[in-house]
Image (cartoon, grey):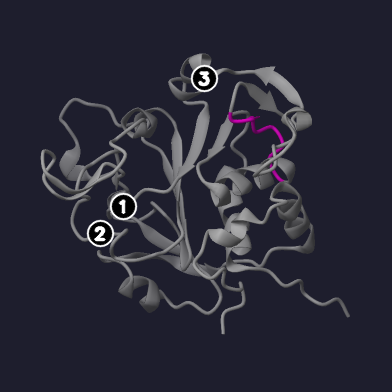
């Protein structure tokens, strides 16, 4: 009898997040942060090998570069894509799928990484500014990773500043086209969500083992919709765990979720 492997909740989320890139074809997979980056790498190594990835500097790689300190020559370049060419080759043509971690997300997928509270001129908390989010959100596919699902992230009403475009019908300008807005998945420590609700609103499609829909709703600032059949998030396989460990030799994934909880909740 084979014993099921032990795994952390973060490792389960990495596997779930890797599904965002399944079947994407030949585009650049960008994961911002340790877990999304490992998820993109896992997707390339397993189910979608045609994905393109960079070494974070100037080269495309066929073998994803492990996280953390490494020898500079450990990478195996497969192409040249410096930052100066990245926008023309990947972003503007829509040949990219990024997974990001916004500070706020609202019901229709608008996000905020700019400031919290107050006004634009006098915010209570100043953050990054909108950075590349406005252009990214109208040019290529985007998904999201949220390590701590709460009402502070999934806010009631609208985000404090709209840093990236979502599906909010109230924001649709007459005559403008929003055909290229393409939001796919949101992976959190409680569930997996997509944008298959009414008017592309967020809906729950998977619950992690031991989590109920009511618990997710309680941690969300707006009314959630549910898929007709909500699945349970699958546990990582031994093969997937081995790949994740190889790509994260310094175990940086253990720092992503508070206290690094086990995947099998008690």
Tell me how far mark 1 sits from mark 2, CA to CA: 6 Å
| Element assignment for label 3 | helix
Q: Is residue 54 left or right of residue 32?
A: right
Which region of the structure is painted magenta?
Answer: 47-56
Magenta-span inclusion, residue 50: yes
Question: Predominant secondary structure in magenta?
Answer: loop
Taking the spot 73% from the left edge, 42% from the top edge, the residue there is 45
Mark 3 packing: few (<14 Cα in 10 Å), some, or many (20+)?
Answer: few
The residue where tag 3 is placed is 83
| Element assignment for label 1 | strand
The residue where tag 2 is placed is 155
Of residue 209 and residue 41, the one placed in the foreground of this image is 41
Q: Are marks 2 and 3 in contact (CB under 8 Å)?
A: no
Q: Farthest residue to the right: give it.
A: 1
Find residue 110 and report its image quarter.
Answer: top left
Taking the spot 46% from the left edge, 24% from the top edge, the residue there is 91
138 is higher (above) or lower (below) than 217: above
Q: Are marks 1 and 2 in contact (CB under 8 Å)?
A: yes
The residue where tag 1 is placed is 105
Q: Is residue 43 left or right of residue 111?
A: right
* Residue 4: image location, x then y, percent: 77, 74
């Amino acid at each position: 009898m084979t014993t099921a492997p032990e795994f952390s909740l973060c490792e389960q989320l990495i596997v779930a997040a890797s599904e965002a890139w399944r079947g994407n074809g030949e585009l650049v997979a960008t994961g911002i942060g340790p877990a999304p980056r490992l998820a993109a790498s896992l997707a390339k190594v397993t189910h979608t090998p045609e994905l393109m990835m960079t070494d974070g500097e100037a080269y495309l790689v066929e073998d994803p570069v492990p996280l953390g300190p490494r020898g500079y020559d450990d990478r195996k370049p497969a192409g040249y894509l410096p930052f100066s060419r990245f926008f023309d080759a990947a972003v503007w043509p829509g040949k990219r799928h990024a997974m990001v971690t916004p500070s706020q997300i609202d019901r229709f997928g608008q996000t905020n990484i700019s400031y919290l509270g107050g006004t634009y001129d006098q915010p209570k908390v100043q953050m990054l500014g909108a950075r590349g989010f406005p252009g990214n959100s109208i040019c290529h596919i985007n998904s999201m990773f949220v390590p701590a699902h709460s009402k502070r992230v999934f806010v009631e009403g609208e985000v404090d500043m709209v840093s990236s475009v979502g599906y909010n019908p109230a924001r649709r300008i007459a005559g403008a086209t929003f055909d290229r807005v393409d939001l796919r998945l949101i992976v959190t420590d409680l569930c997996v969500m997509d944008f298959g609700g009414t008017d592309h609103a967020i809906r729950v499609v998977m619950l992690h083992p031991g989590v109920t829909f009511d618990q997710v709703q309680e941690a969300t600032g707006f009314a959630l919709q549910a898929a007709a059949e909500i699945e349970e998030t699958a546990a990582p396989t031994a093969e997937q765990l081995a790949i994740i460990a190889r790509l994260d030799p310094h175990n940086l994934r253990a720092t992503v979720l508070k206290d690094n909880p086990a995947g099998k909740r008690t």
